[in-house]
Amino acid sequence: MGGRDGARKTTDTSACPCGTGRGYGECCGPVHRAETSAATAEALMRSRFSAFAVGDVDHLLRSWHSSTRPAGLTLDHRLRWTRLEVLATERGGLFDATGTVEFRAHYRDRGRPGTLHERSRFRREDGQWVYLDGEPDGE
């Protein structure tokens, strides 16, 4: 997902890219700045989508499970992530250790629309929700 050149210009008063309707400063911004952590697997999924949209590689790597985290990450500057649809969640709540979020992430690649449909698995690591892995659904 995402990249700096295609990244959205986001301020704390901008609408959060994750689609909650809240401002970035009260939604994903504090999670990106590590001022707070995501309370649920879905909240982490939303923060990761927003990180792709704004080009926040640090948050993406920090929120990746240690067993599957890549050594580095280069975002594709040709992609502009435009909208997130959360389709379903399984577990991933305040008292769960694991969770799954199914979503559609919409993007534009050099002006052409596209969609990524995935079931992402999340797990708690050191008490925090982290992304474990995902299974794309070929739409």
Image (tube, grey):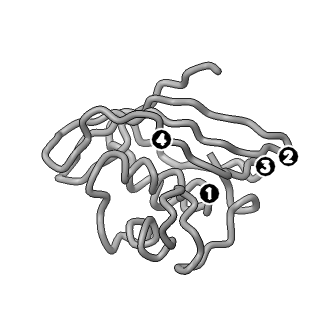
From the top left corner, tell me how far across and down residue 89 is, in percent.
Answer: 35, 35
Badge 2 is on which residue?
110
Give residue 30's quadrant in the image. bottom left
Of pointers 2 and 3, the one earlier in the residue sequence: 3
Instruction: Identify residue type, mark 1.
Output: Ala
Badge 4 is on which residue?
86
Query: Residue 90's mark?
Result: none
From the top left corner, tell me how far across and down residue 17 is, in percent.
Answer: 57, 60
Of pointers 1 and 3, the one earlier in the residue sequence: 1
Instruction: Identify residue type, mark 2.
Output: Arg
> Is residue 71 or residue 3 the one in the foreground?
3
- Residue mark closest to the camera, 1 vs 3: 1
Of pointers 3 and 4, the one earlier in the residue sequence: 3
Q: Dot 2: few (<14), some (14–19), or many (≥20) neighbours within 10 Å?
A: few
Q: Residue at x 58, y 54 (%)?
A: 52
Quarter placement of the N terminus: top right
Q: Is residue 29 above or below residue 86?
A: below
- Residue mark closest to the camera, 4 vs 1: 4
The residue tagged with tag 3: helix, strand or loop?
loop
Instruction: Identify residue type, mark 3.
Output: Arg
